[in-house]
Each structure stands twice: as structure tokens, then as C-alpha cells.
Image: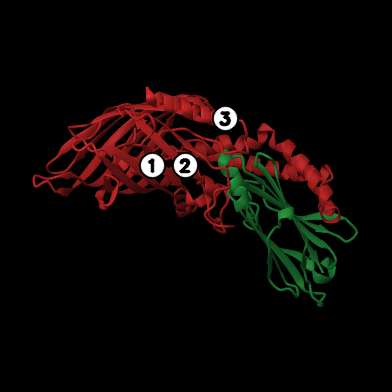
Chain colours: A green, B red
Amino acid sequence: MKRVYDTGLVDNNQLSTAVNVITAGAAYSAVYLLRSGGQFNLIDESTSQRNNPNPEKPANGDILTLPIGLASKVRKSYIVVRTLINMSHLDDDLRKREVELIRIDYSFSGGFSDNQVYNFDNDDITVSPDYKMVSITKPVEMI
Amino acid sequence: MKSFITLIIFFCVNLCFAQDKDSLTLKDLEIPNSPGFILLDQAPTSIERPNSVKAFTVGAFNSFGESNGFPKNYAIEITPFWFFKHGKNMSALKYIGIQNGKLTTALKTVSLSVAYVNKDDTLTNKPINNIAFGARTNLLKLYTSKQRKDIYDAYFRTVNHLKYVDSTLNAEGATVALKVIKPDEYKAIETRVLNLIAKKDSVSSIKKAVNLRPLIALDFAIAYNTVFFNNDFSTNRFGRFGTWLTLNYSQSLDKEDNEKNNYLNLYVVGRYLSDGTKKNNQDKYEIQNFFDIGGKFEFEFKKLSFGYEYISRANKEIKTHRSTGLIKYKVQDNLYITGAFGKNFGSTNNLVSLLGVNWGFSTGNEKLSKK
């Protein structure tokens, strides 16, 4: 399900986002900026490196506060966050339960909507039949 | 003999349920080891560490000596962690227990149990109903530096693989643009890609590392028992209270790596026990306090494990011990046969001869609260 964030009338509002993934599974997140023309680019990702020198990049799928640009630049585009989760280290009977316990907070700030936190919706999540792999894709429209 | 018949029934039921993955499945048939059974000296072993965490477990066992073929002793155990929302900082490394947050680890492994043990009074032949409430948790897990490295390496291999999955989704056409423009098409491609990737062995490489036994583990348990006589609630009286720590040292017996999962396990247990089940000379129940100290060694191979335990129980007036051997055989992934034989505490009615099964079932649908 698409969510909407109001960037406001002030063009030089500096917008930012953050992603907090709460799960016992191994997670990776990628944040994309999708332009109105359909072009998209990766603007940040959680780390996949063990010896990560940047403490701002946790390895559990989180994205700490990420500037996404001025309101004038991102208005009429989408911020899309795709989080992939591997549950295979959990026993068979626990994976389905853990899928139900996944929570992701998508935080946006800097615009007219001020601090806004979204969660994913049912149509954002896809789970493999054995519950080992989970993909959650959350689009948020910047208006 | 009837115990074996019971086992066969459980085996057949297990096979029947195993035919349909989505239906209720019986898992990990083992002798129950809930603190309540251990407090009542009714478990095959008095020294045991928790097995892998289950959301919900039901246990039942019977002794060879009981004429009734169906189990008379039951326990249910739940792990609340799997029924409630996780804290904001929950992550895989915290779940595994190698990242900071010892309290989180302890809370995660807390399990609560209720055990029911039914015995017949030797004088009146009327039933004595024991109900025991217990809790246990892992307080500490220490891995070797090599084990920690292996777990971290496996974790980051897994995260890197997820990054690769993200690229694969884009390459297969499941782009974020498609998600916004044609979500149904996006979902179809995403489902196909995830299903294919989930079937590959590389997805599960982290499981092997996570299942490594820590070099040292320290577990805590506490249990309280109340007794009823002849199924009459008004006869309710204190039975036992106990609290204990179990220290476990696991040494891998595999030369190159831990893939075969052969271990020598050494345990030390210290227990405080308050026992109100014995009568004094005035034919009244009196509370006696004991301290247990003991140890156990156990060889654990892929399908077979066997061990021996000795526990001394003493106070100023009484000294007794428990000395038992235990053997467990894995018939298949979810079917274990366990037997124990030896001497229990006390000087009378002290034969340990147990055979039992236990199964944990969790369809993922049992709920205590709504998300």
C-alpha cells in the first residue's frame, strides 16, 4: 500500500528518513529514490560488511537518519525501501511465528507532515513458502 | 511393553501429521525436561540444559514400572519471546547471543512451564497429584574466538547474499518502479525469485554456524510444586521449591570442523531444595532443606547420546544421592527414544526406569496476544 508524506510548501525543507528493522532474522535494507519519470537510483543501504568503519551503517537492516534532499528536489517522487530478511537460522516452527513478529518503522521528517512513522502493509510483504526468505517493499510518495 | 505401544502410537501419529506440512506437526520428541519434572525428581536426568528454544512444547512420559500404558505425567512449556513483539533493538546477532545485551539474551530464552505428575500413594493406593510451576533461562553463553568468528562470518555472508537478492530482483524486473506502477506484476516476480532462492542451500549457511554449541553455558531454573491428594483441591499443600544453576562445558569431538556435531558435554549443577513431602515422627509433613551438588558427562553423536550423572543431596541429618545412566537415540528428525535407568534419591521407592517421548508443536498460529 502506498503512503504519502507531505513535503510542505517550503522548497528548501531538508527531508530525511530512517529505517528501523525489528526482527530476529538477518536483514538488509536498500533505500531507493524513484523519480516521477520512472527512473530510480539507490541512495543508501544498510551495511553488509563486517569491518564496517561507519557506525552510521548498522548491519541489521537499519538505516540511521538519512538526508534525502530538499523538498523541491524530491517532491512528486517516491522513497521506496526494500528490506530482505533471511530466517533460515530459526527452527522450522519458529519461522512463521517470527514473520508475524517482524516490524519495520519507516520514519520521515523535515516536511509539512513533520515526524511521521509508517509501517509496512500486508501487500508490501512477500514470504517464501518455507518462511526462510522475506521481502518487504514500502513505497512512500513525496507530495 | 505398553510404554512401547504408546511410543509406537506417537510415532504413527507423527508420521501421519508429517504428511502435510501445513497441518499440525509433532516435533522433537524427547523426554520432557521442564523444571517441574526435575524438581520432582521425575525427569530422566536431573542435569540438563534447555534444548533449542521452542515456542510451545508439550511433553509426556511414562515409567516402565507403571501398569497403565498411557502416560500419566505431562508438561507444557512456552517461551514468551515468541508470543510478544520484540524490543526495538532486536536483531539476528542479538537473537543468536553474540552481540551485547546479555539481559536481552536471558529474557529471550525464558520459558515458563507447568508440569503434572500423577502418582499413587503407596499406603492407600489413592492418587497423589503434583503440579509444578517452573521457569528457566540461559544466563550466559561463551563461545571460543573461532566460534565467534565463524558465526560473524556466516552472518555477514548471509547479509551479503541478501544484497545479492536485491540485485537479482532488479535484474529480474522486480524494480521499485514496477512496485509503484504495477504492484501485482512486481509481486509475481518477487514471489518467483524468493521461492527459487529459498530452495538453495546457500540460504541456510547461517544455520550451521548458529547451531554451534557454546564452549560454556550457564543456565538458571526455578520451580515450585504443590500437592493434592485423591483429586481433592482442599487437600492442597506445599510440596517442593527448588532453584538451581547448571554450568555446561561442550567440547567438540570433530577434528576439522563441527559439521558432524559430535560433542563431549560436561555439566556441574548446584541446587537449593526445600522439600515438604516427608512426614516426621508425629505423622505431620515437615519442610527439609537440602543442597544438591553433582555432575554429569555425556557423549553426544549424530544420532546417539549417552551419559551418566551423579548428584549428592544432603543437609545436616540426611545424605542421599542419585546415580543414573541415560541414553537417547534419534530415530528420525522428529522422533527420539529416551531411556534412563539407575537409583533416585532416597532409600525407598528409588528406582529410576523411564522411557518417554515429548513433542513440541507450533504451527505459528498459537497466540497470546494480537500483533
**Which numbered disc covers residue B16?**
3
Q: Label 1 crowding class (10 Å Cα cut-off): few <14, some 14-19, many 20+?
A: many
Three-letter code, disc 3:
Cys
Q: Secondary structure at mark 3?
A: helix
Q: Amino acid at mark 1?
A: Ser
Q: Chain of mark 2?
A: B
Disc nearest the viewer among 2 and 3:
3
Q: Are marks 2 and 3 on the same chain?
A: yes
Horizontal and vertical percent for residue B152?
A: 57, 42
Classify 10 Å Cα crowding around label 2: few (below 14), some (14-19), many (20 and above).
many
Q: Residue at x 51, y 37 (%)?
A: B147
**Residue A53 x/y as whole percent:** 63, 52
Q: Pick the residue in front: B62 or A112.
A: B62
Label 1 secondary element? loop
- Asked if residue A40 shows in the view, the reply is yes
Identify the residue at image location x=68%, y=40%.
A129
Q: Which residue is mark 2?
A: B57
Where residue B149 appears, as percent x and y from the top left, is 55, 39
The chain letter under disc 1 is B
Q: From the viewer's side, name the closer residue of B318 and A117.
A: B318
Spot occupied by residue A108 in the image (x, y as percentages of width and height) = 71, 67
Residue A96 is left or right of residue B253, and the answer is right
Quick check: B149 above or below B67?
below
Dot 1 or dot 2: first in sequence order is 1
Cα distance, mark 1 to mark 2? Answer: 10 Å
Relative vertical location of residue B49 with respect to residue B304 in this rendering, above or below: below
Q: Judge whether residue A137 can be spotted in this image.
A: no
Q: Is label 3 or label 1 in front? A: 3
User: For mark 1, what is the residue?
Assistant: B34
Q: Residue furthest bottom?
A: A10
Looking at the image, is mark 2 or mark 3 earlier in the sequence? 3
